[in-house]
Amino acid sequence: MERLESNRLHEEALTHLVGGVNSPVRAFKSVHGNPIYFEQASGAIVTDVDGNELVDFVQSWGPLIHGHAHPSILESVYEKMQRGTSFGAPHLGEIELAKHVKRRFNHMDMVRFVSSGTEAVMSAVRLARGYTNRDILVKFDGCYHGHVDSLMVNSGSGLATFGIASSPGIPKDTVATTLIAPLNDEEALEFLFDEHGDEIAAVVIEPLPANNGLLIQSHSFLHRLRDLCDQHGSLLVFDEVISGFRFKDGSYGDMCGVTPDISALGKVIGGGLPVGAYGARREIMEMLSPLGPVYQAGTLSGNPLAMAAGCKTLELLDESAYDYLESLGQLLEEKVVPVLEKHGFPMRLVRLGSLFWLSPGSGDPPSRADQIPKDAGKLYADVHHGLLQKGYMLAPSAYEIGFLATAHNEDHILGMVSALDEVLSELEERK
Ligand SMILES: *Cc1c(COP(=O)(O)O)cnc(C)c1O
């Protein structure tokens, strides 16, 4: 596949946009390539500006659970658009989407909509600090919560400690209020609560960490976290921006039997338009302005087009949609595992429902960031490039997951697996 026009546009973009992109992972840096310019997308397929068609397993990084440009989602948005694109005033769509969200996240008495996952987590953190009247946060090494200053923190040395900023531009005083702990490690958690428990406003975690591969946590770890928060009066914040509405049986918290105090949402709930949300029980949400003193606002919050796309997306997510996604996931697993075993490269499949990860390494899947091999870049870059040439697009990074959508079908999966088989054979010959 030639990408002359894509490459030309990328060259031009480099003079106008930083690195040619508006979000860093789109730059294809970790797979040593140029980004692909999309012309249009429909269902499972994207068409690039050179006219190449690709089966898309990125799906805008998670929001498009029904694929690109789903006809009834488009129709809902068109219909609303004719009545105005932004009101800056309340409207019915907000109530409807709030009801959808509460049906699935039934620990929420009230919801607040924002415009991104980052904003949802950032606001949830402010609310938790306002409610508890404490400053300290706990986050886990390997979780991503958007580009929130206080959560852009990596582990330094030691077991559970104050972290170091993962980007310049974050004040030392901000980092000094964030403790960082390893995932799936009850002992580290206990240590940390022993030392700092009564100062901890909130523990923020992706209960299904899915931004540094897919790091499935033991349910007992999440239960222990809940207990420790209760013992010390800290709030538990589940960041379900990526896991929310991905599973038939409810929130990911429900699936583990753990109820958080606050949940943050995004991605799927906007159906491809910018939406984030957070919610909690009444006494917590009543701290939020205009009822309470914790301030949070947004010019485009509750945008009518975004609410319409979200409502239609969630309406379409009935039991049969989840069953279908699970059957696609099972097919992928059944077909891809023998292919990976046959070639013997250090690559394994980790899958839960419609989320999958071609994980570097072999043996048991990792549950903590420090168990992920750091040298996965080269093999993954070769696999990624090979698949692109055969018409299949995976995330342009070994540490990002893939997404199945109801727009995928068996042929898309079987086609991708046999392309992967060919790519791995070609890599073997080159060895
Ligand atoms: C994507 C993501 C975010 C950030 O959401 P944006 O809409 O990109 O700001 C936060 N938390 C998790 C778990 C995510 O997957």
Image (cartoon, grey):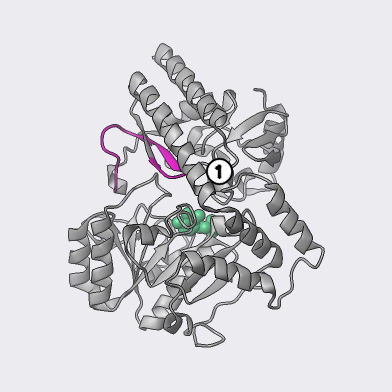
Q: Quadrant of the C terminus?
A: top left
Instruction: Give the residue at the far top of this rendering.
Output: 429
**416 or 17, which lies in front?**
416
What residue is shown at x 27% (from left), y 72% (from top)?
229
In this picture, is 292 found above or below 113? below
One can see residue 400 in this view:
no
Where residue 20 appears, as percent x and y from the top left, is 64, 44
Amino acid type at mark 1: Ala
Does the segment drawn in magenta span residue 218? Answer: no
Instruction: Give the residue at the far right of this rendering.
Output: 82
Where residue 378 appears, as percent x and y from the top left, is 42, 29
- Asked if residue 72 lies left or right of residue 338, the reply is right
What residue is shown at x 69% (from left), y 34% (from top)?
47
- Asked if residue 135 lies left or right of residue 1, the reply is left
Helix, strand, or loop for circle 1?
loop
Mark 1 crowd level (few <14, some 14–19, many ≥20, 10 Å Cα): many
- The residue that disc 1 covers is 405
**324 or 3, which lies in front?**
324
One can see residue 416 in this view:
yes
Q: Which residues are magenta?
A: 351-367
- Asked if residue 18 lies left or right of residue 111, the reply is right
**81 or 51, which lies in front?**
81
What residue is shown at x 57% (from left), y 62% (from top)?
116
Does the segment drawn in magenta span residue 361? Answer: yes
Where residue 399 appears, as percent x and y from the top left, is 42, 42
